[in-house]
Each structure stands twice: as C-alpha cells, then as structure tokens.
Amino acid sequence: MHAASSPFSRDCRNVRDLILFAAFLAVIPFIFKRPVVGTLAYALVSLMNPHRLTYGFATFFPFAMYLCIATLLALLISREKKKLPMSPPVVVLLLFFAWYTIGAVLAQDPAAAWLDWDRVSKIMLMIFVTMMTVRTVSDVKLLALTVALSLGFWGVKSGIFVLVSGGGQGLKGPSSSFIGDNNTLALALVTITPLIAYLITQVDSKWLKRGVMGIAALTALAAIGSYSRGALLGACAMGFFLWLKSNQKFKTGLAIAVVVPLVLMSMPPEWTGRMQTIETYEEDASATGRINSWMFAVNVANAFPQGGGPNVFSPHMFMLYAPNPDRFYDAHSIYFQVLGELGYFGLALFLTLFAVSWRLGSKVIRFCRGQEELGWALMLARMCQVSIIGYMVAGAFLTMAYYDLIYYVITILVVLDKVLIRYPQPDNTPPMRIGLVEWYRKRIQSKAAATAQRKARSAFPR
C-alpha cells in the first residue's frame, strides 16, 4: 500500500480542513463585533480560495456564503455608522450592475445568463458592503493588506514553481476559480504586484521588509514566467508608468534596463518563442481564434442594443453571429466580453468606471501630497493606479471582466477618499484583542524601545 493511501496519511491531509474550519469558526464572533472583519474574511476567501488547498470536506464547503450571511446580519444589528460614499466610481458601478441585470433579463440564453448573474451579484454585493463597513484609516490599511497577501500567497507559490521548473509552463491557480489556469493567474499576479510593493514601504522591521520584498519579487517572476503574453504586456505597461511618474527617472530607467534583460535571458527557449508570437499573431491559431470571438462580440452588439446578455459566448450563438461559426472561443478580452454581453452602452460604463476610479486616485494623491503623515495613502493610491493599468492591458486578452480583484482595487480608492476626504473621523475604534497577535505586537514594541535606548546611550556616553 502506498503511503498516500494509508489512514495516517489521510488524517494528515485532513488537518488542513480542520485548521480552515477552526479559523472560520474563530472569526465569526469578531464579525459581530465589527462587520468589517466579515468583509475582510470574505475578501480573503474569495481571492485566495484557501479551501481549494484542502483535500476533504472543506474543499467544497461554502465558506464565502456563510461569511456573507454573517456579515449582513452583523451589519443589520451593528450600531456603527454605515455610509456608502456616493463618489463617481460607486455611482458608475451601481449603474453598471443595473445594466448588467437588464442584460440578464433580456439575455439570448436566459438560463446561462442567470447563472453568471448569480455569481457576479454576490461579488458586487460584498464590494458595496466593504465600501460601507470600512470606516477608519486602520480599516483601509487592513483591506489593502488582506487583498495583497491573499494573492501574494499564490505569487510566492507560483514564483517558487517557476524557479524550480525553469519556467512557468503548467502553472496553475486554485481550481474552480477565476484564476485556475496560467493566463488568468498571471493577470491576477500582475494586478496585485503593485499592492505588494506598497506593503514594502509600510514595514519597519528589516527582516519583515526583506520578506515582503521576496513576496513581491516571486509574484512578479511568476507573472512574467507564466507563459502569458498578456501578463508580459501588462508588466511592461506598469513599468513604463512607474518610470514616467518616478522622481528619479535616470535611476529607475537604469534599474529597469539592468533587471529586465537578466530576467528575459533566464527564461527557457519555449518562453521566448511564445512571447515572439505577439509580433506574428496572424500565424498563431489562438490569436486568430480570438479575433473571430471579437468580431462575434461586435456582431452581437450591433444586433442587440443591450448586448446578448451574460454568458452569450456559446457555440449556439457563434453559429448565428461569428464570422467563422466553426471556431468557438471564449471572449478572450475584458472589453469584447463586456461588448458582447452588455452592448456598447455597457462597454461605455465599464470604461467610465476605470476613468473615474483613476481620477479619484489622482484626487487622493493631490490631497495627500505634502502631508508626511499621509505618505502611506499617497503610495497606496498610486499603486492602485498602477494595478489598474496592469489589469486593463493584460485583461485585453482574457475573459476576466468580472474578476473581483479589480473591484477590490477600486474599492481601496473609494474608501481612501471616504476616510480621508469625505467622512474623516478619528481612528479610535477599540482594538479586538487576539492573544497571539498582541503578544507579538508587544514583543516588537519592547525590542524597538530597547534598541532606541541603546542608541540613546551610545549617542550620549557618560
């Protein structure tokens, strides 16, 4: 008998399930103390998919659903102020989801459309709940930390895989999720890398800073080495924007000029060959199939003002509206996905959402500029803008228009505006004590105090 099938081995594998359930049960009381804890826990489960790392009963347990229910109940009974800031991104997102619902009502394939509507409506509900429950500066920082590390885990895991295998061919994300294959996972890693870079600036401990830098490096390596051409283009666009906005363009440009060739030379020939197909797309079967899908989306949008409805990319509809009915592909583009499903007006709302989110980020940056105590917010807003660039470029080649990560990035910008400009309030929420965390925090503080005392004594010897 193989060791993997022994009772002892099965018990060890089920430990993951037990740990995840224990964490789930432990967080419930904190949700009823502060509903924002529920939104953070939901974001972690939604983005990281920790249940997909288990082997037993937890694999298909609806953690997200129960966290959503608990958060909504806590929201109803909580005495905290619940404000949905009606900033431009929030208004446009409400309009976009309303139009998405109209598209589902008038869909060409109602059964398939309502399946997608059910999933997207849950994402949007928790995005709006997150905007309502985040009230303080600490809440914003915790949200950014949760979003960054939820996908930073997959960045580290995938980066190690690229190093060990000599390339990211065969790279996989959590099964049965938005980021299950190498291309979708690469988009997520490209989008999240700037937020992990933000975390580097927020840690004081030398070793902790090195650890976060390692997470950022592995995440970026995984995105580049994923064999995803869209991820490569997204990373290039983000690098150009960072150089453009840098105060030290020569040093930044020199660093890029040194690092990029080293990374490219370390990749295997198969990776180089795939990236070169960007220039010869007309000879690439998958690229020509995507063009067929894009023309299908245009034809559907021309035929139906409201679009074909969610999930319109189906073999049956391709037989009616695709230039080549025999070549069925998914949308392979966030823009043509929205165009085919929601029509030209839906696409206009989708693009407007990113435009107003960008402007909101610029508003936060202008507000924070010159205020040293708000340097963290300026950095966070700027990195959210970089994330939007990465998503919009890499997403041009992937069917990820409703992936919740980008809506969390927009949410971070919305709540930055909320807690700093629209509804500022003192960050005086009583902390929720967690024994292990409190012990570690006090230990760090005592070490810092001891270090400060030693420096003071050395500066003024007797």
Image (cartoon, rainbow, N blue to C red):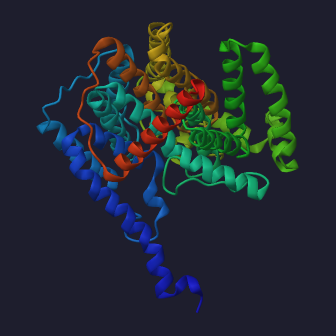
Position of the C terminus, as image quadrant, is top right
Q: Could one spot residue 111 in this view of the protein? A: no
**Residue 409 shown left or right of residue 328 in the figure:** left
Q: For residue 87, which quarter of the picture?
A: top left
Question: How many marks overall?
Answer: 0
Where residue 32 sits: x, y (%)?
A: 19, 44
Position of the N terminus, as image quadrant, is bottom right
The one of 282 and 219 positioned closer to us in this rendering: 219
Where residue 35 sits: x, y (%)?
A: 24, 39
Residue at x 68%, y 35% (from the top left corner)? 230
Residue at x 60%, y 38% (from the top left corner)? 206
Q: For residue 89, which quarter of the picture?
A: top left
**Residue 171 shown left or right of residue 425 in the figure:** right
- Most extreme residue toward the front is 462
Q: For residue 307, which quarter of the picture?
A: top left
**Residue 162 shown left or right of residue 148 in the figure:** right
The one of 420 and 242 positioned closer to us in this rendering: 420
Where residue 231 sits: x, y (%)?
A: 67, 36
- Residue 291, placed above or below residue 328: above
The one of 45 and 312 positioned closer to us in this rendering: 45
**Residue 203 shown left or right of residue 285 in the figure:** left
Where residue 379 sits: x, y (%)?
A: 53, 21
- Most extreme residue toward the bottom is 1
The one of 332 and 454 positioned closer to us in this rendering: 454
Q: Could one spot residue 85 in this view of the protein? A: yes
Residue at x 35%, y 41% (from the top left corner)? 40
